[in-house]
Image (cartoon, grey):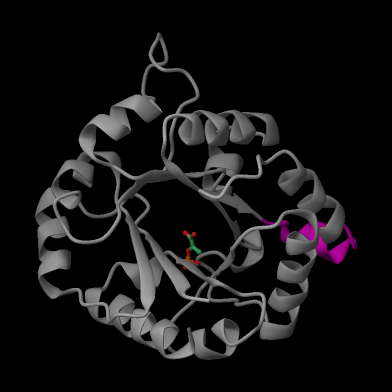
């Protein structure tokens, strides 16, 4: 199956840096690519050749929700989808399994794609709770051909601590036993560790944070993914 490589820029790159990124970024045939810029750079990014996803989306069509953006607004801009439930939203902005479900359903109803992020905290893994946490987070998600799940163990995000390929494979197989969809791995993916992770049978691609900011490193990750597709 074709691997999917999604770059989550988090709160990096305004419009000027977005143009500079696309000037230098190259992806070969044989890999699906999605870029998730911050809201202010979406309009500039949608003119490029790759699908563009927002990093969040609200469940209401409009209303008194200061600071939020609706799925309809993203569609109007030409955005093709949204991340939902990223662990940074869960940790710092009060996102719950229920609000993740609502965001995912609204985005799908508006015709958008969704990458829904799930993953356990370090303490939950140490306490043997990984499967219970993943089950809770995955079971609320709608089954839909435009919904992809990203398994991102929270202890591996932005920390340089990557899950071993075996550990990631085990979590992906578990998620697929609950939900029939593509499952991406996320957590400190870099050109040096990507091939071993992407070679696992149930790792269908990656959601990449830090290493997606540099066009050379994200191009290199896309080449690795294409070679394994
Ligand atoms: C992410 O932001 O989804 C992520 C996985 O970040 P990083 O690759 O920097 O760990």
In the image, taking residue 19 as reference, residue 220 lies left or right, namely right
Q: Is residue 210 above or below residue 89?
A: below
Viewer can see residue 69: no
Q: Residue furthest top?
A: 64
In the image, taking residue 70 as reference, residue 75 lies left or right, namely left
Viewer can see residue 43: yes
User: Is residue 126 in the magenta section?
Assistant: yes
| Residue at 53% across, 47% down | 88
| Residue at 50% across, 84% down | 194
Q: Is residue 102 above or below residue 13?
A: above
The magenta region covers 119-129
Residue 60 location, x and y as percent?
47, 18
In the image, taking residue 29 as reference, residue 131 lies left or right, namely right
Closer-to-camera residue (76/1):
1
Q: Residue furthest right?
A: 128
Quadrant of the rendered image containing residue 162 = bottom right
Quadrant of the rendered image containing residue 65 = top left
Residue 123 location, x and y as percent?
79, 59
In the image, taking residue 170 as reference, residue 82 lies left or right, namely left
| Residue at 38% across, 25% down | 70
User: Is residue 145 in the magenta section?
Assistant: no
Q: Is residue 140 above or below residue 168?
A: above
| Residue at 47% across, 34% down | 107
Residue 84 location, x and y as percent?
52, 42
């Amino acid at each position: 199956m074709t691997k999917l490589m999604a770059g989550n820029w988090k709160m990096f790159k305004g419009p000027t840096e977005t143009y500079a990124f696309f000037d230098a970024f190259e992806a070969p045939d044989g890999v699906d690519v999605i870029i998730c810029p911050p809201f202010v750079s979406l309009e500039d990014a949608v003119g490029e050749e790759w699908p563009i996803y927002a990093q969040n989306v609200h469940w209401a069509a409009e209303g008194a929700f200061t600071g939020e953006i609706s799925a309809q607004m993203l569609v109007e801009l030409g955005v093709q989808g949204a991340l939902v439930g990223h662990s940074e939203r869960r940790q710092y902005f009060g996102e719950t399994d229920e609000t993740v479900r609502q965001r995912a359903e609204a985005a799908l109803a508006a015709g958008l794609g969704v990458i829904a992020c799930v993953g356990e905290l370090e303490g939950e893994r140490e306490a043997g709770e990984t499967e219970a946490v993943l089950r809770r987070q995955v079971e609320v998600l709608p089954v839909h051909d435009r919904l992809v799940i990203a398994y991102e163990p929270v202890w591996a995000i932005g920390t340089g601590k990557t899950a071993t390929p075996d550990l990631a494979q085990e979590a992906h197989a578990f998620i697929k036993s609950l939900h029939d969809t593509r499952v991406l791995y996320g957590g400190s993916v870099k050109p040096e560790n990507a091939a071993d992770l992407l070679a696992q049978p149930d790792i269908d691609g990656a959601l990449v944070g830090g290493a997606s900011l540099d066009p050379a490193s994200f191009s290199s990750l896309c080449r690795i993914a294409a070679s394994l597709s």
